[in-house]
Image: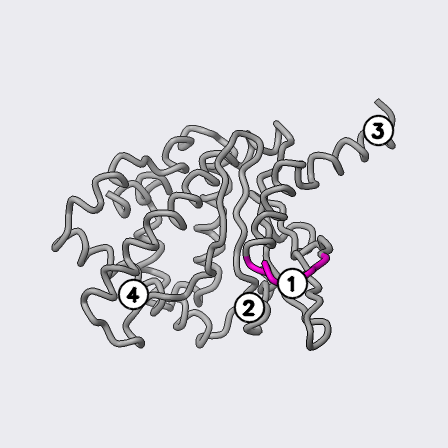
Amino acid sequence: MDNASVKTRKQECDYPSSKVLTALQQLLERQFSSKSFTYELLPATEKGENYIGIVYRVSVKLNTSCGVRLSNIILKMAPRNSTRRKQFFIRPCFLREALAYEEFLPMIENFQRNKGLAEEYCFHEYAKCFYTSTDELEEVVFLEDLSLQEFGVFDRFDDFQFEHIATVMRTYAKLHALSFAIKDQQPKALDKFRKIEDIFLQHKDVSNLNIYFEGLKRTALACLEQESDKYRQILDKFFKRPFFEIFSDLID
């Protein structure tokens, strides 16, 4: 196969299938039923920013009685390339993402609402989901475009500021607090999620994965001061065990 054929094949695998495009058309028709519209698919991420999905920004141009109005939707689809699907566990990841949007997040939203939690204590830091498909090789989710709220993809090679990390940890704290509360007060609501085995633990014997995670441990240690730093000493002791042994204990 020549280079041109390989490139064409890759482009076909990276572009939404006719089934996904039909689902997109139907979604837009439901959302903008009283308006005529056109749309364009634009890359939403740079190369290397997303491993398990191919992400497009659907730029919609609405023709209204008041003129043209613009709107966006995010289309995140699973790669159809068999090697990539196997390497990054694509299908199980998309199945879980769909389950999260279809069942888990609505469950915690209802729990929060029924408890009458104040807005500041509610977990709502996620994109609204409009549609999911878990059909083999057609996995896709359509999401709210958070760039309209001035969110963006952070360069993973840049340093995080303390304020960023603190915000992320506070947000995760709300999510985990809700999980504990539901486990305590409505345990049956979690039954369908209990049988889910962690994807990484399923592949803990893959040597490349072990090498990668052991490297992350070294990177974490390198962020701290040298031997005189008491936190580095504590973390160094904690990291003596293999990564997956630590990981298994933490998610048990």
Q: Tell me which corner region of the image, top left, top right, bottom left or bottom right, holds residue 51.
A: top right
Give the mark toward the camera: 2 or 4. Answer: 4
Residue at 55% across, 54% down: 30
Residue at 48% across, 60% down: 222
Circle 4 is placed at which residue position?
A: 174
- Amino acid type, mark 4: Lys
Task: Label 3: state its secondary structure.
Answer: helix
Image position, residue 201 (x, y; %): 36, 35
- Amino acid type, mark 1: Lys
- Amino acid type, mark 2: Asp
Circle 1 is placed at which residue position?
A: 35
The stretch of residues the image draws in magenta is 31-38
Q: Are marks 4 and 3 in contact (CB under 8 Å)?
A: no
Give the mark toward the camera: 4 or 1. Answer: 1
**In the picture provided, is 30 more to the left or to the right than 226?**
right
- Residue 5's label in the rendered image is 3
